[in-house]
């Protein structure tokens, strides 16, 4: 398994989304590579972003699309749908330029969430076609819902699109009380048939559906049983990417590098214990 660090955990509003901090932090983090989190604020300087990332020559196999793409599509208006698709194309361009392999997408989200899911479901096909034009594997995340739940939405998507790929987020699943579904025979098809191509690792520190505590925490700062999750990864013979998503900013925007490196060490341990 390769352990990645989400740039969303080290570059965010706390430090003005300054992507140039990646050079500093990348030298201190003991991960195998990065998952680039795209921000809308970067769309006005895409050429600079691409040039900067190419010069750094970091290993960035995964790009996480700007989180409002699914929200735009879910509104159902022509103007917002076009806006979302334009964002998506920009993210595909960045991913292609830096030689990424995978593209993570929140197919729904925001206040509209999955309330207009039929529209989001239908537009998946168009988005997937665009991703393929850039030689990218599109992964749909089990993002939180306010109408149904992520597993229900995944099952609906798989029924329409039998070859669809997913990224399983531990925090998102725990928020809905669905983490243990991953271990059950009823849902073995998700990993046995290769639908889950990637995992996001973040802890969750509250009871199910506590919208005031949706933040992704570093491993050990919430209540997820990661020993059981690590055992599942070994049973399923998973050998792909694991992206740490827990945020470690302080009030000044500084990153707790020691904490993140400890999390990377824990994740690598899942591959070793019998």
Image: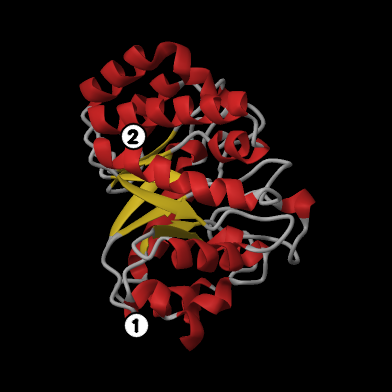
SS at mark 2?
A: helix
Query: How far across and down, in percent of the image, does residue 215 sit?
Result: 65, 48
Residue 160 numbered tag:
none
User: Which residue bears the numbered disc 1?
Assistant: 235
Quadrant in which the C terminus is drawn: bottom left
Picture quadrant of residue 129:
top left
Is residue 184 visible to us here?
no
- Residue drawn at (63%, 41%), measured in percent from left and top? 74
Q: Is residue 233 above or below residue 93?
A: below
Q: Is residue 134 above or below residue 149?
A: above
Picture quadrant of residue 149:
bottom right
- Residue drawn at (24%, 27%), measured in percent from left and top? 97
Query: How far across and down, in percent of the image, does residue 177 sit?
Result: 66, 71
Picture quadrant of residue 206:
bottom right
Q: Give the distance between the C-alpha atoms of the residues marked 2 and 1, in whole angstroms.
A: 32 Å
Residue 26 numbered tag:
2
Query: How far across and down, in percent of the image, does residue 240 sit?
Result: 28, 61
The mark nearer the N terminus, 2 or 1, is 2
In this rendering, which labeled residue sits more in front, label 2 or label 1? Answer: 1
Is residue 29 visible to us here?
yes
Query: How far across and down, in percent of the image, does residue 117 sit?
Result: 62, 52
SS at mark 1?
A: helix
The residue lying toward the viewer, choosing from 191 and 78, is 78
Is disc 2 in contact with disc 1, using a CB cutoff of under 8 Å? no
Q: Residues within 10 Å of mark 2 (few under 14, many from 20)?
A: some
Q: How many numbered marks have been drawn onto this rendered protein structure?
A: 2
């Amino acid at each position: 398994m390769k352990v990645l660090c989400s740039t969303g955990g080290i570059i965010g509003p706390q430090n003005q989304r300054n992507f140039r901090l990646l050079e500093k932090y990348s030298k201190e983090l003991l991960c195998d590579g990065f998952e680039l989190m795209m921000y809308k604020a970067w769309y006005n300087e895409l050429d600079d972003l691409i040039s900067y990332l190419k010069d750094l020559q970091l290993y960035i196999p995964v790009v996480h699309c700007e989180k409002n793409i699914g929200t735009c599509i879910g509104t159902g208006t022509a103007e917002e749908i076009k806006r979302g698709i334009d964002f998506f194309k920009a993210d595909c361009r960045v991913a292609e330029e830096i030689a990424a392999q995978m593209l993570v997408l929140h197919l729904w989200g925001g206040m509209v969430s999955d309330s207009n899911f039929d529209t989001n479901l239908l537009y998946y096909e168009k988005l997937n076609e665009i991703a393929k034009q850039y030689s990218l594997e599109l992964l749909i995340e089990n993002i939180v819902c306010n109408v149904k739940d992520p597993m229900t939405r995944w099952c609906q998507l798989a029924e329409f699109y039998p070859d669809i790929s997913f990224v399983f987020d531990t925090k998102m699943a725990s928020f809905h009380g669905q983490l243990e579904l991953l271990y059950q025979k009823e849902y073995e098809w998700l990993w046995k048939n290769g639908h889950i191509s990637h995992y996001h690792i973040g802890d969750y520190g509250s009871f199910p559906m506590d919208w005031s505590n949706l933040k992704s925490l570093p491993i050990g700062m919430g209540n997820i049983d990661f020993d059981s999750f690590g055992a599942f990864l070994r049973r399923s013979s998973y050998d792909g990417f694991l992206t740490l998503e827990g945020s470690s900013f302080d009030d000044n925007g500084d990153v707790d590098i020691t904490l993140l490196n400890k999390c990377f060490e824990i994740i690598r341990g899942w591959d070793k214990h019998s």
